């Protein structure tokens, strides 16, 4: 069975998006970063391409970020892998029963997710973590396809950009609910959107987001996904 976007599986979505070169600015930046590298990773081969979603194709919970990090997912080829944001995210997913291990360091490290799929509205690392609206819209068919093909019940939006993207991709019409950590709204089709501060170092280093705060959101998502 295919989705309205024409994709038949999340594997097909991933295989198509990793070849995408639709946004010249993002292509230049992701490839420049992959060539110049960070000194700590100078001996590594960077992925330097669009990053596909990862997780359980039968997930009931979608974890929605912003975009790949230049020296994280743009280096490793897997969402939230190889940087401190990912350290926080996967540790929480492990504590709340979605992941088989608390770390995600490389694409072949044995990580498995159960009941969760991790993705983003933008699939290439953007300069200063700021994609343009045009770049966001160029990526939209990939997220639309994932949302069509995965039998999710809950989206956990990491940050305001993801929150707005979730509303846009699920057909929200009219005045939009504001993003807040711990925020919750019922989407037009009856499914649930939950908000969490992003797992960026800005939030985790300052204590704006704590482990218990993040775990609480994922435990709520787990409970809601079983209804």
Image (tube, rainbow, N blue to C red):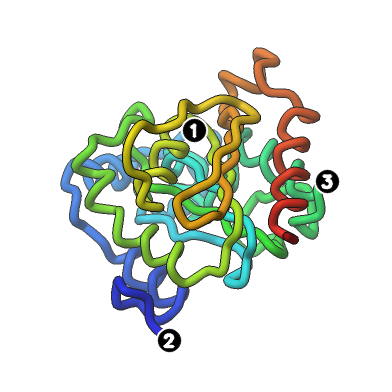
Quarter of the N terminus within the rendering: bottom left
* Residue 111 x/y as whole percent: 70, 61
Instruction: Tell me the number on the disc at residue 1.
Output: 2
Specify few, some or many for label 3: CA neighbours under 10 Å numbering under 14, 14-19, or 20 or more.
some
Task: Choose mark 3 or mark 1, whichever is in front.
Answer: 3
Earlier residue among tags 3 and 1: 1
| Pointer 3 residue | 95
Judged left or right of residue 207, residue 174 is left
Question: What residue appears at the point 38 percent right and 66 percent down from the top-left corner?
Answer: 145
Earlier residue among tags 3 and 2: 2
| Pointer 1 residue | 39
Is the C-beta separation of discs 1 and 2 under 8 Å? no
* Residue 98 x/y as whole percent: 75, 56
Judged left or right of residue 169, residue 150 is right
| Displayed quadrant of residue 21 | bottom left
Task: Choose mark 1 or mark 2, whichever is in front.
Answer: 2
């Amino acid at each position: 069975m295919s989705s309205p976007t024409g994709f038949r599986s999340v594997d097909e979505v991933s295989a198509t998006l990793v070849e995408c070169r639709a946004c010249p600015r993002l292509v230049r930046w992701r490839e420049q970063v992959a060539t110049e590298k960070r000194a700590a990773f100078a001996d590594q081969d960077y992925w330097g391409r669009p990053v596909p979603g990862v997780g359980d194709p039968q997930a009931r919970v979608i974890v929605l970020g912003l975009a790949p990090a230049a020296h994280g997912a743009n280096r490793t080829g897997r969402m939230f892998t190889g940087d401190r944001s990912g350290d926080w995210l996967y540790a929480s997913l492990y504590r709340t029963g979605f992941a088989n291990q608390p770390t995600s360091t490389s694409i072949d490290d044995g990580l498995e997710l159960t009941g969760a799929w991790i993705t983003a509205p933008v699939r290439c690392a953007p300069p200063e973590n700021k994609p343009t609206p045009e770049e966001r819209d160029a990526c939209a068919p990939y997220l639309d396809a994932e949302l069509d093909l995965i039998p999710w019940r809950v989206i956990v939006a990491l940050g305001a950009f993801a929150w707005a993207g979730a509303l846009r991709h699920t057909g929200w019409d009219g005045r939009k609910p504001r993003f807040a950590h711990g925020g919750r709204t019922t989407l037009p089709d009856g499914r649930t959107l939950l908000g969490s501060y992003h797992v960026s170092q800005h939030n985790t280093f300052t204590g704006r987001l704590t482990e218990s705060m993040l775990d609480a959101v994922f435990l709520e998502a787990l409970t809601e996904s079983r209804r």
